[in-house]
Image (cartoon, rainbow, N blue to C red):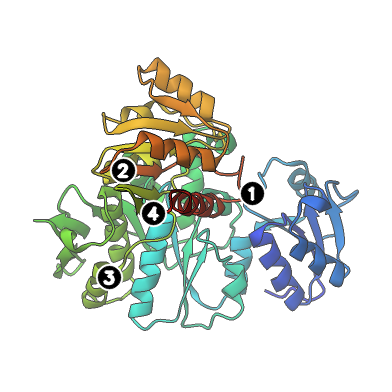
């Protein structure tokens, strides 16, 4: 893709937007920038770059005209019904996202992984498998490293193991991974997608350009995800933790097994040898196994990695044990289903810290999942009173609302007893109080560390 002297408007000055600016400048494009926020609310490093290169900028104002641009590159957080996008459509300006830009610039092969939950763990685990197979691997995307930041430097034999969100998939056009995967679909982001049907359609775009020479890995145990195979032209490879399969990756006699098109059969490892807890992480391991095997990685390499992989930060992450009370950071639990899986994975009684930005989720199933295991619920953030009301309506009254994380940690510790777990699993996004779930998780860990210092233990 030739960008030299092309007039490009980069919209959205977050992490991916900053990476887009870097790449566009290195490709000698004529770059302008836009963000709905005021200049004062944008990262100072981005502002310094904008000023250093003398880029035309639109902060908290729309351009008077957009017709002179060749391309609009929008960040995932910008919905397609915003005024800027509407202007670009009317002016006939091509609109793409950071992921599509990365694909057009990259010589390497893309592995694309999406789903409501498990994306980060599956992407990280898949990346480790590929690295252990001595393949040049870049683990990118929604996992924290913008794909476009590695796109130009990645050689032809490199693998871009990419976590992909529904927001990113809305703006692809040519994106064509050699292997795509949908892990599951449960209610999420309905404040943006409006309906589950729209949300599922956005996820299905992951295989939009694939053909029979590529593979689509899909969860047979999740009806919403498995239904997407109807429109798929790629080779369909299912995985299941509940039933044996004639083709795919599954569990039999507590062993992760592979059966391919030639009826080759491999026992990879016992599920008891996995270091990551919970049935949801077993599904993630099955998905990673299928992705790797159908990308040509040997079962031996997959086996070694599955036995060694200890998970990712902010996803059921052990933090500390203070006076017999364990603290677990699951800040990545950004929707009710993700938090339900965390609750199920922990075997001890617990005090649960939850709440955050409202994405239009309902919390009845979340409260039902407590199943006498959650002794007390400590809430914060924009959804605190919504969750409390749902809990009270369902007869659960051990609820308290606090206004910051430090108070939540202190309150949870007071309610807990030796042998209990304090679990941060918010069931909500972080953006009401934090820039991202990583910052929320780190603040939780800092608060736990502060608690230990206060107690002098």
The answer to whether residue 95 shows anywhere in this view is: yes
- Specify which label sits upstream in the sequence, 1 or 2: 1
Q: CA distance from mark 4 to mark 1?
A: 43 Å
Mark seen at residue 77: 1
Of residue 164 and residue 366, the one placed in the foreground of this image is 366
**Left or right of residue 351: residue 175:** right
The answer to whether residue 337 shows anywhere in this view is: no
Mark seen at residue 457: 4
Residue 36: give x, y in percent of width and height: 77, 47
Mark whose residue sits in front, 4 or 1: 4
User: In the picture, which quadrant includes the N terminus?
Assistant: bottom right
User: In the picture, which quadrant includes the C terminus?
Assistant: bottom left
Q: Is residue 258 above or below residue 197?
A: below
Mark whose residue sits in front, 1 or 3: 3
Mark 4 neighbour density, 10 Å: few (under 14) some (14–19) many (20 or more): few
Of residue 373 and residue 203, the one placed in the foreground of this image is 373
Q: CA distance from mark 2 to mark 4?
A: 45 Å
Mark whose residue sits in front, 3 or 2: 3
- Specify which label sits upstream in the sequence, 4 or 1: 1
- Residue labelled with disc 3: 308
Find numbered disc 4 in the image and state the secondary structure of the residue it sits on: loop
- Specify which label sits upstream in the sequence, 3 or 4: 3
Residue 294 picture quarter: bottom left
Residue 167: give x, y in percent of width and height: 57, 49
Of residue 298 and residue 230, the one placed in the foreground of this image is 298
Find numbered disc 3 in the image and state the secondary structure of the residue it sits on: helix
Q: CA distance from mark 1 to mark 3?
A: 35 Å
- Residue labelled with disc 2: 222
Q: CA distance from mark 3 to mark 2?
A: 27 Å
**Residue at image location 64% in from the left, 49% down from the top:** 77
Residue 101 picture quarter: bottom right
């Amino acid at each position: 893709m030739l960008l030299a002297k092309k007039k490009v408007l980069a919209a959205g000055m977050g992490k991916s937007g900053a990476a887009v600016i870097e790449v566009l400048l290195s490709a000698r494009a004529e770059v302008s920038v836009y963000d709905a926020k005021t200049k004062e609310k944008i990262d100072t490093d981005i502002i310094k770059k904008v000023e250093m290169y003398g880029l035309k900028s639109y902060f908290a104002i729309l351009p008077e005209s957009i017709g002179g641009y060749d391309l609009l590159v929008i960040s995932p957080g910008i919905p397609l019904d915003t005024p800027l996008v509407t202007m670009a459509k009317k002016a006939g300006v091509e609109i793409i996202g950071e992921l599509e830009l990365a694909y057009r610039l990259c010589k390497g092969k893309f592995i694309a992984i999406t789903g409501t939950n498990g994306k980060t763990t599956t992407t990280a685990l898949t990346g480790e498998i590929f690295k252990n197979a001595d393949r040049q691997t870049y683990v990118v995307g929604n996992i924290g490293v913008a794909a476009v930041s590695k796109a130009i430097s990645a050689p032809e034999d490199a693998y871009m193991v990419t976590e992909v969100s529904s927001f990113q998939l809305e703006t692809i056009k040519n994106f064509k991974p050699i292997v795509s995967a949908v892990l599951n679909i449960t209610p999420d982001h309905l404040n943006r997608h409006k309906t589950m049907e729209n949300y599922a359609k956005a996820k299905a775009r992951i295989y939009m350009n694939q053909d029979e020479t590529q593979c689509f890995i899909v969860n047979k145990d999740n009806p919403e995800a498995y239904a997407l195979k109807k429109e798929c032209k790629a080779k369909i490879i299912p995985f299941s933790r509940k039933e044996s399969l004639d083709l795919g990756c599954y569990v039999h006699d507590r062993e992760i097994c592979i059966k391919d098109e030639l009826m080759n059969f491999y026992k990879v490892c016992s599920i008891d040898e996995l270091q990551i807890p919970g049935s949801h992480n077993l599904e993630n391991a099955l998905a990673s196994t299928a992705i790797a095997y159908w990308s040509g990685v040997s079962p031996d390499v997959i086996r070694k990695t599955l036995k060694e992989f200890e998970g990712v930060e902010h996803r059921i992450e052990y933090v500390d044990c203070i006076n017999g009370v364990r603290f677990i950071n699951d800040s990545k639990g950004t929707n009710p289903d993700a938090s339900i899986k965390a609750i199920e994975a922990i075997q001890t009684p617990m005090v649960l810290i939850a709440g955050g930005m409202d994405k239009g989720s309902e919390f009845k199933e979340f409260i039902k999942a407590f199943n006498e295991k959650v002794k007390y619920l400590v809430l914060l953030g924009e959804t605190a009173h919504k969750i409390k009301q749902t809990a009270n309506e369902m007869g659960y009254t051990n609820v308290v609302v606090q206004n910051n994380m430090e108070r939540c940690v202190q309150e949870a510790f007071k309610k807990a007893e030796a042998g209990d777990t304090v679990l941060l699993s918010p069931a909500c996004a972080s953006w009401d109080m934090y820039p991202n779930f990583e910052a929320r998780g780190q603040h939780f860990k800092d608060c736990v560390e502060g608690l230990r210092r206060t107690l002098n233990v």
